[in-house]
Amino acid sequence: MARVVFEPIGEEIECGENESVLDASFRQGYSLVHGCREGQCSACKAYLLEGEVVLKPYSSFALSESEEEQGYTLLCRAMPEEDLVVELLHFDPEDYRAEHPIREGAASVAGIEELTHDISRLVLSIEEPEDFDYRPGHYVDLVIPGSEDRRSFSMANLPGDGRIELIIKRYEGGRFSGLLEDGELKAGDRLGFVGPYGAFHLREGERPVLMVAGGSGMAPQLALLRQMARDGHDGPVRFFYGARSRADLFSIEEIEQLGAQIDDFEFTPVLSDEDWEGAGGLVHEAVSSYLEEGGLGDDLEAYLCGPPPMVEAATEMLIDVRGVDPKQIHFDKFTTAVAAGDTEQEAGFR
Ligand SMILES: Cc1cc2nc3c(=O)[nH]c(=O)nc-3n(C[C@H](O)[C@H](O)[C@H](O)COP(=O)(O)OP(=O)(O)OC[C@H]3O[C@@H](n4cnc5c(N)ncnc54)[C@H](O)[C@@H]3O)c2cc1C
Ligand code: FES
């Protein structure tokens, strides 16, 4: 058992053998900033002030060799070899205690609906725990039937109605999403889940809100929109959604209805492969032009969700071009689990 002290908050936890610092922190009621929990997204990056760690496999996109040499580490991969002092790079001083315990649960499939040619809505009815609760923006891990492997999916609905609503991009041959593609998953089927996880949620305050999503990255953004429509929100909210063509757009009517309940809301679909009257090109470029024209000012709170390249391009633009404070940029990269059989090397892992 090693002791791990987190600076600058001064909290201390115990970390077991073969346990990652992030898992140990969950077990002891902390919710440090995290994303994929698999060494791929870099959300849990921290600085080792004292002590040595062994790292489980991780992607060099999340932690480069030179960063590791300088003392940076990934808390979801780091297993202490001795007592540690860790400097948290991203943390909210008001908000590092877990509000909702991470629990195992079971649910049954209540409905599956095709939203586009490759995106489906999966609605689950929660059987246990009956009081399962989470923050809008959080995600759950679903257990792939017949295995112990899990896949992460963000909840699109607000908590409290006994359901979990997911928006899932279907990949042919995908171990979980493929079950939707070939109709193997049916109403009434039972699924195990674990959660809630995630650090993506609406921050308090009056800064203008910029939301950027692509593909199934719509899911947690819908949860935030539903929250703002329910609770009210002061100040402007701008939602840019990137897609290839009109055929990839969905839930537009609902977004408009939710937007009508928010004082100052605009929704901009951005199509990359089709000319139309809306914005064109890549979504981060459309956002950049909007901000360049003075859209929201640069002191904003940004929420980015979807494919990692989209999230990375938008983050880079916001920090390097607009000078947005990284603490005001919140993201979930929808990284893919490394497929069984892939070597860590082939998958960009170290
Ligand atoms: C925090 C978090 C939240 C997430 N939330 C969502 C969500 O709300 N909705 C959602 O649809 N997904 C979400 N994901 C991604 C999801 O967890 C799975 O990785 C994805 O559904 C693929 O799983 P699979 O089992 O179907 O495919 P796998 O069996 O894991 O993959 C099979 C093959 O399909 C291809 N493939 C799979 N995923 C991708 C991809 N993203 N891009 C390109 N090729 C791919 C690859 O070739 C891969 O080898 C999230 C991921 C994270 C980390
Ligand atoms: S790299 Fe650690 S949470 Fe994603």
Image (spheres, rainbow, N blue to C red):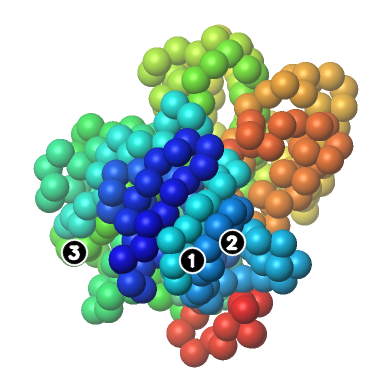
The three-letter code of the residue at mark 2 reads: Thr
Please give the count of numbered marks on the rendered protein: 3
- Specify whether 236 is left or right of 167: right
- Disc 3 secondary structure class: loop
Mark whose residue sits in front, 2 or 3: 2
**For the residues marked 2 and 3, what is the alpha-carbon distance in whole angstroms?**
40 Å
Circle 3 packing at 10 Å, graded few (<14), some (14-19), many (20+), is few
Between disc 3 and disc 1, whose residue precedes?
1
- Where is mark 1, residue-wise? 78
Residue 277 lies, in percent from the top left, at 78, 33
What's the residue at 51%, 69% (across, down)? 53
- Where is mark 3, residue-wise? 189
Q: Which quadrant would the N terminus be assigned to in this image?
A: bottom left
The three-letter code of the residue at mark 1 reads: Ala
What's the residue at 28%, 75% (across, down)? 148
Q: Which quadrant would the C terminus be assigned to in this image?
A: bottom right
The image quarter containing residue 182 is bottom left
- Specify whether 327 is left or right of 177: right
Q: Nearer the viewer, residue 240 or 112?
A: 240
- Disc 1 secondary structure class: strand
Q: Nearer the viewer, residue 112 or 217?
A: 217
Disc 1, disc 2: CB below 8 Å?
yes
Between disc 1 and disc 2, whose residue precedes?
2
Q: Nearer the viewer, residue 124 or 252?
A: 124
Labelled disc at residue 88: none
What's the residue at 62%, 48% (across, down)? 214
- Where is mark 2, residue-wise? 73
Residue 88 lies, in percent from the top left, at 55, 45
Residue 208 lies, in percent from the top left, at 64, 19
**For the residues marked 3 and 1, what is the alpha-carbon distance in whole angstroms?**
36 Å
Disc 2, disc 3: CB below 8 Å?
no
